[in-house]
Image (spheres, rainbow, N blue to C red):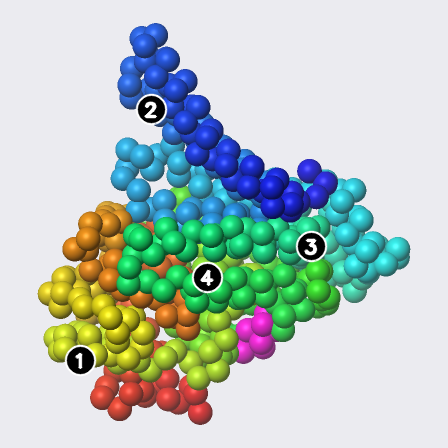
C-alpha cells in the first residue's frame, strides 16, 4: 500500500465489503453446518473471519473509518462474553496498529516535507514503524543531538480520506433522525468533522502537546513527551518508554489496574483546569505507565479547547441529580440543549437511565467492570419508542466531552479498575462540590 484509497467511489466500495463480506461468510457457515460441523464451531469461525475482515478494511482505509474502528475497539468491553471472545483481540489491535506504509513511501513523504537532506536531522532512523494508526504512523529515530525521538508521519492522502469518510457519515443523518428523534445530528457531525479535521495539522497538534508538556513538566503523576520539531505533516517528539495501557488491560495486576485507572481519570478531569484543553482521544494506545509509575500520554491531535475548564453546568447537574431534584435536572438539561424544546421525557425513566452513569460520583469508591458496562450498553441499545435515550440530544459543544467520557468509561471497564474516582470529580469539576458553582480546588486552579 503506497497511498490511501481516497476517491469516494473507492472508499465506498471498501466500506461496503463489511456487510457484504459478512453475508458471504454467513452463507459459507450455513453450508458447513449442513455438512455436519457444530453450530458453535461454525459461529466462532464466522466471528473470527468477520473480525479479521473488519481489521483489514478499516485498517487499510485509515481516516475516519479507522477512527470508527478505534472507537469500536474500546466498546468491545460491552459485548456479551460469548460474542466478545473472537472479536476482542482483533478489535484491540485497532487501538495500536494498522497496515504500515512501505519504506519507499515514508522516504518520499520525508523528502517532500523536510527536503532531500532530511537524513541530516537524524543520527539514526528506523524504516519500520513502531506504531501505525488512523492518519499517521510513528518511527523511532535518534535526533541529531543524540536524543531518542518519535517521528510521526502523516499518510499521503489522509486529508481527502478523512473528509470523504465524514461526508459519507453525514448521509446517515436521516437514519439517525428515525432512530433517535431527540437528536439533532447535523451540528453533531459538523462539530466532529471540524474537530477531527484539525488532526490533519500536525502544527496544531504540536502546539497542544507543547502546552500539556509544559504544564506537566516534572509532575508526580503525568509525563508528556516534549515536542522537538514539527510542520503540518511531520511531528518529532521525545521518545517515551514504559508499559502500554493495553498490556495492563491484558495481564496487569489488580494494583496496576487500579493505579492506572485512577491516574487516567485524574488526567482527563484535571487537564481542562490546568491546561485549558481536554485530551479527546482516550484509547489505550495513547496511554502508558512509565517506569516511575507515572501515566505517560501521547497523541494530542484531538483536543477539546476549554479555556474556562469544564462547563459548570456539568458538575452542577451531576450534584443536583445526586440530591434528587429531578425537576431541576430536567430544567438544566433543557437549558444546556440535551432535551430539545419540542421533546417531552418521562422523568422516572430519565432518572433510571442516568443513575448508573452518575453512580461513580455518589460513592467513595467505585469498581468498573465489563459486566457493569454491558448492563449500561443494553439500555442504550434499546431503541423501542418508549426508551428515554431516543428522546435525548447531544449539543455540539458537548460532542468531544461525551466522546471522552464514553470512551473513558470503556477503558476503565477494560481495566476493571477500582478507586476513589469521586475525589477527582470533587477536586476538578466546577459546580459539583458545593452550591457556589465551583469546587474549591477548581477555582484555585483556574485563577
Element on which disc 3 rests: strand
- Tell me which label, 3 or 4, sits earlier in the chain: 3
Residue at mark 2: 43
- Picture coordinates of residue 78, whole percent (x, y): 30, 47
Looking at the image, the residue that sits furthest to the right is 116
Residue at mark 4: 189
Number of residues whose C-alpha sits closer than 10 Å to that of mark 4, classed few (under 14), some (14–19) or many (20 or more): some
Position of residue 441 in the picture relative to residue 434 (left or right): right
| Span shown in magenta | 208-215
- Picture coordinates of residue 121, whole percent (x, y): 82, 60
Which residue shows up at 28% across the image and 33% down it?
A: 82
- Observer-side mark, 4 or 1, equals 4
Residue at mark 3: 153
Which residue shows up at 59% across the image and 70% down it?
A: 209
Q: Nearer the viewer, residue 10 or 375?
A: 10
- Tell me which label, 4 or 1, sits earlier in the chain: 4
- Tell me which label, 2 or 4, sits earlier in the chain: 2
Residue at mark 1: 328
Q: Nearer the viewer, residue 48 or 336?
A: 336
Position of residue 143 in the picture relative to residue 27 (left or right): right
Amino acid at each position: 500500500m503506497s497511498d490511501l484509497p481516497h476517491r469516494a467511489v473507492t472508499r465506498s466500495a471498501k466500506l461496503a465489503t463489511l456487510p457484504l463480506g459478512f453475508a458471504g461468510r454467513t452463507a459459507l457457515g450455513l453450508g458447513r453446518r449442513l455438512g455436519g460441523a457444530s453450530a458453535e464451531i461454525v459461529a466462532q469461525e464466522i466471528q473470527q473471519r468477520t473480525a479479521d475482515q473488519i481489521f483489514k478494511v478499516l485498517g487499510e482505509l485509515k481516516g475516519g473509518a479507522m477512527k470508527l474502528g478505534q472507537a469500536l475497539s474500546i466498546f468491545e468491553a460491552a459485548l456479551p462474553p460469548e460474542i466478545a471472545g473472537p472479536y476482542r483481540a482483533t478489535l484491540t489491535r485497532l487501538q495500536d496498529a494498522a497496515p504500515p506504509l512501505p519504506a519507499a513511501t515514508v522516504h518520499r513523504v520525508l523528502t517532500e516535507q523536510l527536503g532531500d537532506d532530511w537524513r541530516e536531522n537524524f543520527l539514526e532512523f528506523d524504516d519500520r514503524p513502531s506504531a501505525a494508526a488512523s492518519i499517521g504512523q510513528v518511527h523511532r529515530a535518534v535526533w541529531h543531538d543524540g536524543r531518542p525521538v518519535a517521528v510521526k508521519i502523516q499518510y499521503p492522502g489522509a486529508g481527502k480520506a478523512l473528509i470523504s469518510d465524514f461526508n459519507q457519515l453525514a448521509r446517515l443523518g436521516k437514519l439517525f433522525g428515525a432512530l433517535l428523534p431527540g437528536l439533532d445530528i447535523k451540528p453533531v457531525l459538523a462539530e466532529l468533522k471540524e474537530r477531527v479535521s484539525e488532526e490533519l495539522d500536525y502544527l496544531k497538534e504540536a502546539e497542544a502537546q507543547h502546552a500539556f508538556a509544559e504544564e506537566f513538566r516534572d509532575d508526580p503523576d503525568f509525563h508528556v513527551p516534549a515536542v522537538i520539531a514539527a510542520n503540518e505533516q511531520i511531528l518529532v517528539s521525545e521518545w517515551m518508554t514504559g508499559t502500554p495501557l493495553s498490556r495492563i488491560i491484558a495481564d496487569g495486576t489488580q494494583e496496576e489496574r487500579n493505579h492506572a485507572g485512577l491516574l487516567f481519570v485524574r488526567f482527563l478531569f484535571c487537564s481542562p483546569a490546568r491546561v485549558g484543553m481536554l485530551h479527546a482521544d482516550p484509547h489505550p494506545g495513547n496511554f502508558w505507565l512509565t517506569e516511575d509509575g507515572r501515566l505517560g500520554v501521547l497523541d494530542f491531535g484531538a483536543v477539546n479547547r476549554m479555556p474556562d475548564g469544564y462547563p459548570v453546568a456539568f458538575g452542577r447537574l451531576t450534584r443536583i441529580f445526586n440530591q434528587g431534584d429531578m425537576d431541576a435536572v430536567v430544567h438544566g438539561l433543557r437549558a444546556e440543549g440535551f432535551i430539545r424544546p419540542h421533546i417531552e421525557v418521562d422523568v422516572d425513566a430519565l432518572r433510571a437511565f442516568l443513575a448508573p452513569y452518575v453512580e461513580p460520583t455518589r460513592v467513595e469508591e467505585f469498581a468498573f467492570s465489563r459486566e457493569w458496562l454491558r448492563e449500561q450498553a443494553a439500555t442504550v441499545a434499546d431503541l423501542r419508542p418508549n426508551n428515554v435515550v431516543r428522546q435525548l440530544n447531544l449539543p455540539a459543544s458537548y460532542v468531544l466531552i461525551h466522546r471522552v467520557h464514553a470512551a473513558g468509561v470503556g477503558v476503565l471497564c477494560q481495566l476493571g479498575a477500582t478507586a476513589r474516582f469521586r475525589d477527582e470529580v470533587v477536586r476538578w469539576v466546577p459546580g459539583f462540590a458545593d452550591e457556589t458553582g465551583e469546587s474549591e480546588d477548581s477555582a484555585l486552579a483556574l485563577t
